[in-house]
Image (tube, rainbow, N blue to C red):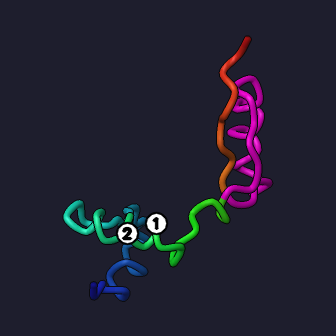
Amino acid sequence: MALPIDLIVLKEATIIGSCGMQAPRFGAMLQMVEAGKLRPGKLVHKTIPLEEAGQVLASMDRFATVGVNVIDRYGS
């Protein structure tokens, strides 16, 4: 996507957005996971209990997290 960088800089604009996969392509992506071509588990840095989620969220403004933290325990 082309962006008017000169206007963005001139107006000191902030651009917020996201990119994602189109829903009709999910099937092909899941086939790649199944075939071992994509390994999303490699993105998981560590698993944490729900009680630690607040600490992880608080540390994100210091870029203290690496990869993805997955909540896998939800209390007793």
Residue 31: mark: 2
- Helix, strand or loop under label 1: helix
Look at the image and give the residue range highlighted in magenta.
44-67
Q: Is residue 65 above or below residue 18?
A: above
Do the residues bearing badges 2 and 1 touch, measured as CB atoms within 8 Å? yes
Q: Quadrant of residue 1?
A: bottom left
Q: Is residue 59 left or right of residue 12?
A: right
Q: In this view, does 55 lie to the left or right of 31?
A: right
Inspect the magenta stretch and tell me whether residue 46 lies in it: yes
- Helix, strand or loop under label 2: helix
Residue topped by disc 1: 34
Amino acid marked by disc 1: Glu
Inspect the magenta stretch and tell me whether residue 52 lies in it: yes
Image location (x, y in percent) of residue 30: 38, 64
Real-space Cα separation, disc 2 to disc 1, in angstroms: 5 Å
Q: Which residue is drawn at 23% across and 60% down?
A: 23
